[in-house]
Image (spheres, rainbow, N blue to C red):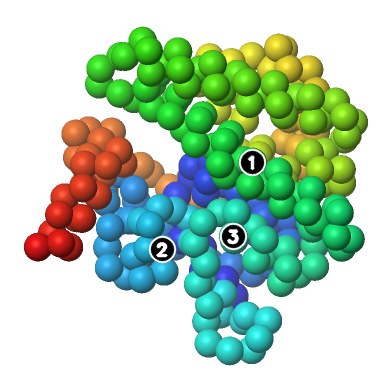
Amino acid sequence: MIDLHYAPTPNGWKISIMLEELGLPYKVIPVNIRAGDQFKPEFLAISPNNRIPAIVDHAPADGGAPFSVFETGAILIYLAEKTGRFMPADMRGRSRANQWVMWQMGGLGPMLGQHGHFALYAPEKIPYAIERYRDEAARLYGVLDRQLAKTGAYVAGDYSIADIACFPWTMTHKAQGFTLDDYPHVKRWYAEVRARPQVQAGLAVGKFVKEPFDEEARRNMFGQAAKALSGRATQ
């Protein structure tokens, strides 16, 4: 059994989709990030960066004590290695899949996250920030489009953790004002991935009621609460 500490966000969806694709038994433990659950000591014990998701594997491959993993790229690689699925067996294929997971972790997710923050959530609309991150998000969509044109199928060849990492962030394209008509290869890939029954099941996980998006939620989600927590820790 795997415990999935989770909220229904693009990063959370990566792991719920992966678990559904693998058919592994798991239990969802909701983390209400608007209420500040991510700062609770019991969550920090398994996710020291106070970000969702995280997992606890109660049946690790070494047969030892339960093992916790945080950071979505690390979780995807861990689960792929545990099961021998969605990761190419050959050196070159494995490296290509990992490269695109790292690309998503270092680029697509953070840049779309920043654009979404400044365009949709920031209390003050800062044109420079919105333009800066929109341009970078558009560049990254272009990178993905060219890669999918090259493979003609999925991000790293066969369907893999590279697709599972990238897909949930492209789910935000409409809210962020992008159209996939500008990226025809992404549009084709997006439709194919979204049609997978396991992906649909993963996206449906944990649609629990969210707290209102008020000032407390803003503080918990966008750093002020983390800053306060850090200040207390150094005193």
Residue 86 figure quarter: bottom right
Which badge, 1 or 3, is on the more N-terminal residue? 3
**Does the rendering let one see residue 1?**
yes
Marks 1 & 3, CB-CB < 8 Å contact? no
Residue beneath the point at 64% across and 58% down: 76
Label number found at residue 47: 2
Q: Residues within 10 Å of mark 2 (few under 14, many from 20)?
A: many
Q: Is residue 164 visible?
A: no
Q: Alpha carbon of mark 3 to alpha carbon of mark 2: how far?
A: 12 Å
| Residue that sits furthest to the left in the current view | 235
Closer to the observer: label 1 or label 3? 1
Count of picture labels: 3
* On screen, residue 168 above or below 117: below
Query: What's the residue type where badge 3 is placed?
Result: Ala
Picture disc at residue 212:
none
Q: Secondary structure at mark 1?
A: helix
Q: How far from the left and from the top, in percent, is residue 39?
A: 28, 58
Q: Are marks 2 and 1 in contact (CB under 8 Å)?
A: no
Q: Which residue is mark 1?
A: 103
Spatial CA distance of label 1 from label 3 is 13 Å
Q: Give residue 34's position: percent from left, percent from top.
A: 30, 44
Give the amino acid at mark 2. Ser
Q: Are marks 3 and 2 in contact (CB under 8 Å)?
A: no
Residue under numbered circle 3 = 74
Q: Position of residue 148 (x, y in %)?
A: 81, 30
Circle nearer the N terminus (2, 1)? 2
Q: CA distance from mark 2 to mark 1?
A: 22 Å
Residue 75 in percent (x, y) is at: 59, 61
Q: Residues within 10 Å of mark 1 (few under 14, many from 20)?
A: some
Among the 4 quarters of the image, the one containing residue 155: top right
Q: Nearer the viewer, mark 2 or mark 1?
A: 1
Position of the N terminus by quadrant? bottom right
